[in-house]
Amino acid sequence: MAKKSVASLQTGSKRLTKAIKMVKSPKTGAYTFVEAIMDPSKVNDFFKK
């Protein structure tokens, strides 16, 4: 499983990060990408799921 934090985004006073995670489907074996925009402190939790 690959992981990468792609960009730091700023909107007003909030600082956000876009994270992309590659997930393998147990049914078909194909890989899909899951994207989320979140607070930088929550990125590690996102990748641990």
Image: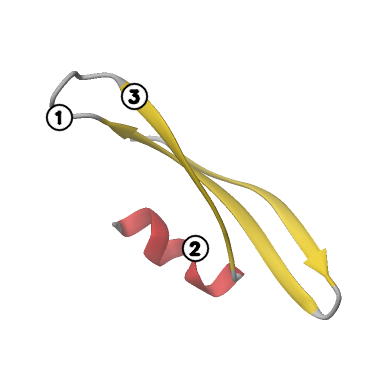
Measure how far apart labels 2 and 1 are at the Cα level.
24 Å
Residue under pointer 3: 31
Residue ID at (82%, 81%) = 13
Q: Quadrant of residue 44?
A: bottom left
- Amino acid of disc 1: Pro
User: Could you say where residue 33 lies in the image, as x and y percent from the top left?
Assistant: 44, 34
Q: Secondary structure at mark 2?
A: helix
Residue under pointer 2: 43
Q: How many marks?
A: 3
Residue ID at (74%, 71%) = 15
Residue under pointer 1: 26
Q: Quadrant of residue 1?
A: top left
In the rendered image, the vertical position of residue 11 relative to residue 35, given as above or below: below
Q: Secondary structure at mark 3?
A: strand
Measure how far apart labels 3 and 1 are at the Cα level.
9 Å
**Relative side of 38 to 29, left or right:** right
Residue ID at (18%, 18%) = 28
User: Could you say where residue 23 lies in the image, as x and y percent from the top left?
Assistant: 32, 35
In the rendered image, the vertical position of residue 37 relative to residue 26, given as above or below: below
User: Could you say where residue 48 lies in the image, as x and y percent from the top left?
Assistant: 31, 58
Q: Nearer the viewer, mark 2 or mark 3?
A: 3
Which residue is the extreme one toward the bottom? 13
- Amino acid of disc 2: Val
Q: Nearer the viewer, mark 2 or mark 1?
A: 1
**Relative side of 48 to 13, left or right:** left
